[in-house]
Image (spheres, grey):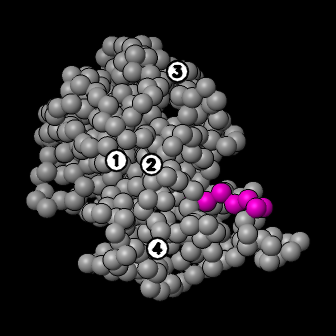
Amino acid sequence: MPSGGRRSIARPASLSGVGIHSGRTARVTLRPAAAGHGITFRRTDLPGSAEVSAIADNVTGQERRTTLGEGDGAISTVEHVLAAVSAHVIDDLAIEVEGPEPPIMDGSAAPYFRALENAGVVDVGGAPVRLGLLAPFVVREGEATYLVAPRAEGGLRLTVTIEWDHPAIGRQSCCYDISPDIFERELARARTFGWTSELEALRDRGLARGANRTNTIGLTASSVDGLLHWPDEFVRHKATDLLGDLVLLGGRLDADIVAFRPSHRGNLALVRAIQRTIGSRGPGIMGIDEIMKALPHRYPMLLVDRILEVQGTERIVGIKNVTINEPFFQGHFPGLPIMPGVLIVEAMAQVGGMLILSKIDKPETKGVYLASIDKVKFRRPVVPGDQIRFEVEMVQLRGKTCKMKGVALVDGQVAAEAEMMAMIVDR
């Protein structure tokens, strides 16, 4: 996996074709983005349509595809373009779609991979978000099962197995250490597939209206309609879909993933399970030096150690490592050290303050004062050795007043949650 800074493309690239489910002509334009922008989608055929970040929280559908956003602004079938984005290790990209879904092209991720390659993948500075696991775990969702383990040497390895009651498929497995070269050679050309007997029923439900022999491998009861690029093209395509859905993590994942019968619904469950358990490797978005430049707090009241993720003014993720050396443990309580709930909320508010201050001019001249808290709930104690993951979302931002809601997680379990009102003031 490339080291150094975050990556985007040097110049725009466009592709046109038909959407596999909508059947409508669609055009996608891949545009360069500044460091920290993340991967976003926007409908250009709908005036005033807002950008939608490619993150798990924005997934609204997984039936035979991955859909982001809601209502008229929703964008479906994003997994192929996201697989190409992941293969090139791109962190920041603005994807504009003229239509309800990107064009399916030939049914594979190869056209998107080539378009990004021709656009020139470049370093845009800033620290990439690196996500590493703390321990192995298993995820099950329907028929899909995933075994996830840390990968000390870094990078992502995918081992995928499928079982399909069809003479051309049966049981197929593949294993790849993901890199641009391996993706281009082994996965990019693997196409989507489906039963021809299901086609009419799917079209009655508004699906597969653009599917045809040029973009889909058709399966009859005993044969394959067309020539395969590889005998195991089916499992390779499932690996490609999984790689695309993993982009919804919002960072570069270092892990070894073994997937059995993966599906879009299972992939999303996997992403959410990883988010509940991941640690950060490397500097993340902001380390303690950047935090101290923005927040006026100092010992013993600076309660944020690192910012892992910032999504515009919408969402921020930060961590606090709790040790026995915390001064409040001397009195809360001797012999039974428990972090005071009020300090958990204070740490959550500081993470929320970073969300605000990271997006305003001259943050060193501003401060964020907590005005009120509401709906505070404490779910489990926080003790020495815990790492608290704070996830804070902006509910409303008007002028110098903002409303946020946050959750504090330890080992994937909710420790506390609250809604907060804050004011931006001059220092």
User: Residue at the location (48% across, 58% down)?
Assistant: 291
Determine which residue is flagged by label 1: 36
Residue placed furthest toward the right: 335
The quadrant of the image that shows the C terminus is: bottom left
- Looking at the rendered image, the disc whose residue lies closer to the viewer, 3 or 1, is 1
Report if residue 322 lies within the magenta region: yes
Quarter holding residue 228: top left
Residue 405 circle label: 4
Q: Position of residue 343 (x, y in %)?
A: 63, 75
Mark sitting earlier along the chain (2/1): 1
Determine which residue is flagged by label 3: 176
Q: How far apart are marks 2 and 4 (CA)?
A: 21 Å
Observer able to see residue 379: yes
Mark sitting earlier along the chain (3/1): 1
- Looking at the rendered image, the disc whose residue lies closer to the viewer, 3 or 2, is 2
SS for tag 4? Answer: strand
Residue 285 circle label: 2
**Mark 3 residue type:** Tyr
**Mark 2 Cα-neighbour bin, 10 Å: few <14, some 14–19, many ≥20:** many
Is 339 in front, or is 302? 302
